[in-house]
Amino acid sequence: MDSSVEQAGSAPYFGECVEIKAEFNLEMADSVGFSLIDDIKEHIIKLDFTTRTIFAIDEQAKPQFLIEPNQLELHIFIDKSVIEIFINGRETFTTIFYPQLNENNALKISPFFIRAQGEVQIDFWTLQGTNPKNMQSERTHPDPSG
């Protein structure tokens, strides 16, 4: 999806195991991020330009490299309980996450922008998890008789 921040902020995505690639070309922004909404509450992934801090779920860090809103790329992988965020292909931030979801529900994922103007392109893919619920292991045993 390639659109202005006003249009992108209203588009929800759904999934438990997803890949998100967001490229921002913003004239200005206080912060950008994604809301992850499970059956109980909202969780946040946010890059705050005013404090130069990234927040993900219950953790935060200060990226080592200077990050500007007009040249930001976030590449995010969510695999049920692990979130990996790659910032401009130079830094990574990883955290654990335990969403509360009923068996057939998925996370609702929505981009958000705080005092932002400009363009954003968001690509979203649903992935198969590394440990799918229905995945069964098959073992073969040699026939002892021969």
Image (cartoon, rainbow, N blue to C red):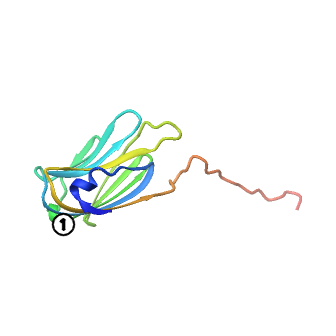
The mark total stands at 1
Q: Is 131 on the left or on the right of 63, as rendered? A: right
- The picture places residue 22, in percent across and down from the top left corner, at 29, 61
Q: Is 2 on the left or on the right of 118, as rendered? A: right
Decide if residue 128 is in sight here: yes
Q: For the view shown, which residue lies furthest in the right direction? A: 145
Image quadrant in which you'd find residue 91: bottom left
Q: Is 123 on the left or on the right of 60, as rendered? A: right
- The picture places residue 107, in percent across and down from the top left corner, at 41, 44
Decide if residue 67 is in sight here: no
- The picture places residue 40, in percent across and down from the top left corner, at 38, 32
**Residue to which mark 1 is pinned:** 71
Q: Residue at x 65, y 50 (%)?
A: 136
Q: Residue at x 26, y 62 (%)?
A: 3
Q: Indicate the quadrant containing the N terminus: top left, top right, bottom left or bottom right.
A: bottom left
Crowd class of label 1 (few under 14; some 14 to 19; many from 20; radius 10 Å): few
- Establish if 45 lies above or below 73: above
- 64, 66: nearer the viewer: 66
Q: Indicate the quadrant containing the C terminus: top left, top right, bottom left or bottom right.
A: bottom right
- 83, 111: nearer the viewer: 111
- The picture places residue 25, in percent across and down from the top left corner, at 19, 65
Q: For the view shown, which residue lies furthest in the top direction? A: 40
Secondary structure type for disc 1: helix
As shown in the figure, which amino acid type bears the numbered disc 1? Gln
- 117, 50: nearer the viewer: 117
Q: Residue at x 40, y 49 (%)?
A: 82
Q: Residue at x 53, y 51 (%)?
A: 131
Image quadrant in which you'd find residue 73: bottom left
